[in-house]
Amino acid sequence: MRYLSTRGKAPALSFDEVLLTGLARDGGLYLPESWPSFSAAEIRALAGKPYAEVAFAVIKPFVGDTIGDADLRRILEETYGAFDHQAVAPLKQLDERTWLMELFHGPTLAFKDYALQLLGRLFDHVLQARGQRITVVGATSGDTGSAAIEACRDRAQVDIFMLHPKGRTSEVQRRQMTTILSPNVYNIALEGTFDDCQDQVKAMFNDMAFRDAMNLSAVNSINWARIMAQIVYYFVAAVALGAPDRAVAFSVPTGNFGNIYAAYAAGQMGLPLSQLIVGSNSNDILTRFFNSGAMEITAVRPTLSPSMDIQVSSNFERLLFDVLDRDGAQVSETLNGFRANGRFAVTDAQLAHLRRLFDCHRLDDAETLAEIAARHRASGELLDPHSAIGVAAAGAAVRDHVSAVVALACAHPAKFPDAVEKAAGVRPDLPARLADLYEREERCTTLPNDLSTLQDFIRDKRPPADRRGAA
Ligand SMILES: *Cc1c(COP(=O)(O)O)cnc(C)c1O
């Protein structure tokens, strides 16, 4: 399997190269040159299989022979065997035709673990084979840093440096990062804002000498392997609810468009989908796009569902590539115009084509709280604000003929206890694996908002490749 850039200019790469590269050199995102296709019989054969086995079947065609079958099976079993629930992504019925898929049974209680836990292990495997090590550098407002740290902790070929704004994350968020005491994990509390953290990370990537010397890398949401890992649970859920003999709809609380793009990819591979519902909060650039055909940037507003507070959904570029008939030059032109003018539009025919599959629904914070309260009254289910948007969008946008709609529960309610308590009057407990979070030892270094101080720190801490025998 070879991978192409959505902008058409970067060289086609193999799976391991795409895994390590992330963003293509022409600024595009990588996609498989063609979709592996699953027949109805092959999909039916997945019914009742353990999660790791379905993952092997779905992922194998993307990986090809860059990882041997036995190694891939072992990596998948290790990854998903460490999750809290034996079903890994269990389904729960909420009402006649609505199911909840719980994607919060990984170490940081959010769906990003499903991809990142695999990504860390794939990095290790591929880097070991190539005799390389990488330095992952990232910035977090508190929300996604822990998933990246959990993905990289204790990996032999990886060091991770995570910057967060000192004193500006919630205590749970900080502790989820700083209580990871693995020797290859460095938490940096920067004396500045989240924007300062992001600017410093960008500056490090723009310093080519430093970037090459440290072999800098990121684990951001545009990495193809993250999408690939997320395709798996759409197969798992659909097969459990009757696929390939019954089409299933999915409702996905959406930010960067990675998760719902994985659902679309599952459809391209042969999984019968009756509908995909994009849920948004007040940052509704996607909802406005699917209603009008125009993508128009506005300012970001903070909401109760911070993981969906986005201005531009970076993974939308992958869908745009198909809308524009896989013409990289046109994608490039469209997105350059978008960057310059803050706007682009598709034609009526292109929008009509997308709307055969996609619908959308937006909730503001008041509606999100009302949904949490209503679901708690109706079924005792506590939803986090992101999951509540998915469930409400499922109810509002599901088409009449659809017999089953799966809403994705993307985070555990205990990750957002204040919003949940405000809505439902109940404070959700942390699950067992985090119950002693407040007693654990923390480790973190406070540094000034200064590039050369940060670079010295990383140079000093990162072991030279030969010292750990990785080269
Ligand atoms: C990341 C995240 C989202 C948004 O997912 P995308 O793939 O960026 O669309 C939604 N909810 C939660 C809880 C998240 O962590």
Image: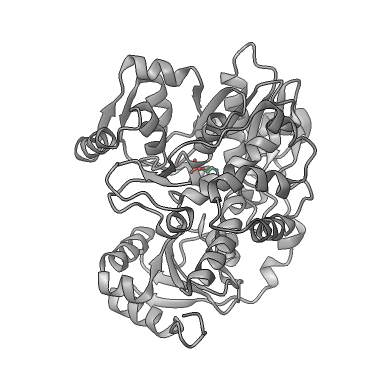
Q: Residue furthest front?
A: 65
Q: Is residue 104 placed above or below 247 in the rendered structure?
A: below
> Is 147 or 270 nearer to us in this picture?
270
Q: Quadrant of residue 217?
A: bottom left
x and y, in percent, of residue 366 in the image:
54, 32
State the residue at coordinates (43%, 49%).
Answer: 222
Q: Along the horizontal axis of the image, is 296 left or right of 49?
A: left
Q: Along the horizontal axis of the image, is 89 left or right of 26?
A: right
Q: Along the horizontal axis of the image, is 255 left or right of 229?
A: left
> Is 108 or 8 nearer to us in this picture?
8
x and y, in percent, of residue 432 in the image:
77, 59
Q: Is residue 179 placed above or below 303 in the rendered structure?
A: below
Q: Is residue 134 placed above or below 49 in the rendered structure?
A: below
Q: Is residue 301 visible?
A: yes
State the residue at coordinates (46%, 86%).
Answer: 466
State the residue at coordinates (71%, 28%).
Answer: 41
